Image: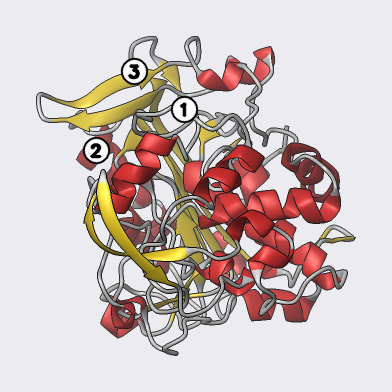
Amino acid sequence: MSALSVTDKPEDLGLSSDRLARLAPYFEDRYVAAGRLSGVLTLVARRGQVARLDCVGDRDAASGAPIEPDTVFRIYSMTKPITSVALMTLYEEGLFQLDDPASRFLPELADLRVWEDGTPTSYRTTVADREITVRDLLTHTAGFTYGFMVRHPVDALYRRAGIEGRSSLVPQEGPPAEDLAEMVARLGELPLLFNPGSRWSYSIATDVCGHLVERLSGLPLDQFFRERLFEPLGMTDTGFSVTEEQADRMGASYVAAPANPLLPIETAATSIFREHPSFLSGGGGLVSTAGDYLRFALMLLNGGELDGQRILGRKTVEYMTSNHLPTGGDLASMGQRVFSETTYEGIGFGLGFSVMLDPVRAAVVGSVGEFAWGGAASTMFWVDPREELVGMLFTQLIPSSMYPLRREMKALTYQALID
């Protein structure tokens, strides 16, 4: 497992010890003691060193097992940046260009049509203005959606087609896709939500990116992750399933229900992660630890390299974490708002990450150019190159929109900077 070494002098990293000490009691008093969260892990690193690590509460409220630095968390959509990095390593090998049609490699996605009107049982479509590109997949502008959105007839079509597999956050009404190949084949039979490039919509697109990695590399996604990312970076606790030893360190997951703000939905003993899945969700299928994910974040902060292991070139990381939205503006400029793991004003989107364009418009302290993402169980991370800073918060509560944990974490982190 990845060890976490915490400095005893945050001041040497330009951070106040006293101000960082506000983190633990804030989350303990406001959330854990109040029964809103079972437990929380927060981490702040600067200039490559961990300045503060706090574990408050339990990873399993029923057993009283505490959250610890090596607790294993379901990171859900924090899988997406990892999949995006994996795909871009193949870009660096010249295996595709970002403006290539996705159908060049995934012919199932050729000749897609766009929803016009109707119901899930009777609808009309039109010919798409253009084909989906690889960049569209990486930026969630392809025209795909998620069945769990439950906001549009196309979402219902996804659920009926079992697009999101057995690991979906909502039950699939049709037989779940058994693997990524089957998912892409079924996607090719459904209409797009909108013309590619015309809007931004959080979607299954990163799972398509995962299958693109498989097609281009000739390897299953789990093997590619292991050989090209996890082993070089020393991410020994990250994967699509857990060993018995890792399962013993796994937290329970909860949902905020009307009658119970902390309703348990899965324990370590009952976790689906005890079995290796056939559906390797590049959009949300991984578990990890704070130590492992920190190594991934530090690699990005260091321009694609960590401890002598280069994953990406420096210019590729800079390019991925630039704003790629077709409008050149923020997410608010891209049409209808849907659920996502970020707010819309002042936030752009790169190749797999949200990108801070304007902290004032975003109404949260931060730096222009910081990049981030979160997961459905209220996890989050961000990397701030300007301040040489990484922040992370891990808990296990669905939905991630229940409390403003991420904004509070950022405020409590940036107020501790002293240089």
Rendered location of residue 83, percent (x, y): 65, 53
Q: Is residue 409 left or right of residue 402?
A: right
- Residue 417 vertical placement versus 376 (above, below): below
- Please report contact status of discs 2 and 1: CB closer than 8 Å, yes or no: no
Provide the secondary structure element on which disc 1 rests: loop
At x 51% / y 49%, what residue is drawn? 187
Q: Nearer the viewer, residue 361 or 329?
A: 329
At x 80% / y 38%, what residue is drawn? 223
Rendered location of residue 212, percent (x, y): 70, 55
- Please report contact status of discs 3 and 2: CB closer than 8 Å, yes or no: no
- Please report contact status of discs 3 and 1: CB closer than 8 Å, yes or no: no
Q: Quadrant of residue 19?
A: bottom left
- Residue 299 vertical placement versus 64 (above, below): below
At x 34% / y 18%, what residue is drawn? 61
Query: Distance of mark 3 from mark 2, alpha carbons?
Result: 13 Å
* Residue 48 visible in the displayed image: no
* Residue 54 visible in the displayed image: yes
Amino acid type assigned to the residue bearing label 3 in the image: Ala
User: For mark 1, what is the residue?
Assistant: 67
Provide the secondary structure element on which disc 3 rests: loop
User: For mark 3, what is the residue?
Assistant: 61
Which of marks 1 and 2 precedes in the sequence?
2
At x 83% / y 71%, what residue is drawn? 92
Mark 2 closeness class: few <14, some 14–19, many ≥20 residues within 10 Å: some
